[in-house]
């Protein structure tokens, strides 16, 4: 089942997060109080609405309590951002990522229930959207327009086959360049096996990486 997202606040960062998630054909709702920014994003994010996230009843009517992951990207309005996070927490949203305007606000958001706090200068919107699109993708680094390097957690059991048996390069057109196992990093050989809990560092085309992630964690 696809993860569902809501992006609240459609400034530059929030709009880019919402557009990137929509391009991946994920279920994303984008909201903002400003009619102009909602109109501007509507062609790229079909589910875009004018809404006030500081009002609990508004979020509840939108069905936010059933959303998997909320991204709060309200800029230059600390009070609105805080109220929104509190509302999301009270509605039972388990994953709440918040854009912070400064390092000083990180601890504040964590204290009121945010599960992740992002300072935009530290993480581009596109990289962040790709990372949150999958629970198993821990890190995402864009190498070129169509290529990336990612860290993916392995949840399926492949201990009965070696890497050469899995033939990942030919089957998925991606390359495993490293494995982190029990906090120890190593470059794998053909005879090595993937184990549950491994974190693999993989390079490839973005669409191929998504398919490989599904293979490791389906």
Image (cartoon, grey):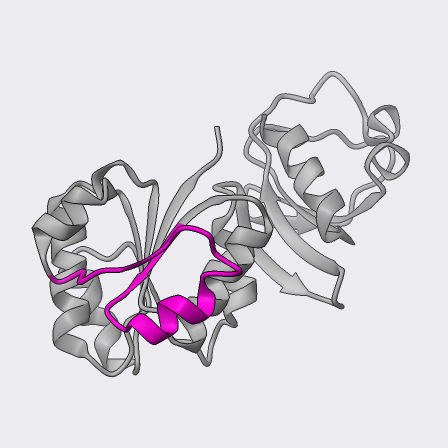
Relative to 48, 147 lies left or right:
right
Toward the viewer: 34 or 10?
34
Q: Does the magenta stretch include residue 33?
A: yes
Q: In this view, does 191 lie above or below 199?
A: above
The percent position of residue 122, horizontal first and vertical second, equals: 47, 76
Magenta-colored stretch includes residue 97: no
Q: Which residue sits furthest top?
A: 160
Among the 4 quarters of the image, the one containing residue 157: top right
At 61% from the left and 50% from the top, the residue drawn is: 151
Residue at screen point 81% across, 26% down: 162
Left or right of residue 72: residue 78? left
x then y, percent, for residue 55:
9, 58
Q: Which of 102 and 75 is in front in this view?
A: 75
Q: In which quarter of the image is the C terminus?
A: top right
Number of marks drawn: 0
Q: Residue 181 placed where, x, y %?
A: 60, 41
Q: Which residue is drawn at 71% across and 59% down?
A: 148
> Does 120 sit left or right of 185 as displayed?
left
Q: In this view, does 73 lie above or below 189?
A: below
Give the x, y percent position of residue 169: 87, 39
Nearest to the observer: residue 87 or residue 56: 56
**Is 63 placed left or right of 49 in the picture?**
left
Q: Give the range drawn in magenta.
A: 29-54
Q: Residue 48 appears in which quarter of the rendering?
A: bottom left
Report the residue at 47% width, 63% height from top. Answer: 17
Whether 183 is drawn above or below 103: the answer is above
* Quadrant housing residue 63: top left
């Amino acid at each position: 089942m696809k993860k569902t997202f809501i992006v609240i606040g459609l400034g530059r960062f929030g709009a880019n997060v919402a557009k990137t998630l929509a391009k991946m054909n994920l279920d994303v709702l984008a909201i903002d109080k400003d009619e102009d920014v909602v109109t501007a994003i509507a062609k790229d994010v079909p589910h875009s609405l004018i809404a006030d996230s500081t009002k609990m009843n508004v979020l509840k009517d939108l069905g936010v309590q059933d959303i998997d992951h909320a991204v709060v990207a309200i800029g230059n309005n600390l009070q609105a951002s805080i109220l929104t996070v509190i509302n999301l927490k009270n509605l039972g949203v388990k994953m709440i990522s918040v854009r912070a305007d400064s390092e000083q606000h990180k601890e504040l958001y964590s204290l009121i229930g945010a599960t992740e706090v992002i300072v935009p200068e530290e993480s581009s919107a596109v990289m962040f959207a790709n990372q949150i699109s999958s629970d198993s993708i821990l890190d995402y680094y864009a190498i070129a327009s169509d290529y990336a390097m990612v860290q993916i957690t392995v949840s399926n059991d492949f201990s009965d086959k070696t890497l050469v048996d899995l033939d990942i390069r030919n089957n998925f057109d991606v390359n495993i360049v490293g494995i982190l196992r029990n906090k120890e990093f190593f470059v794998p050989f053909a005879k090595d096996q993937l184990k549950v809990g491994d974190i693999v560092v993989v390079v490839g085309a973005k669409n191929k990486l998504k398919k490989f992630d599904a293979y490791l964690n389906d």
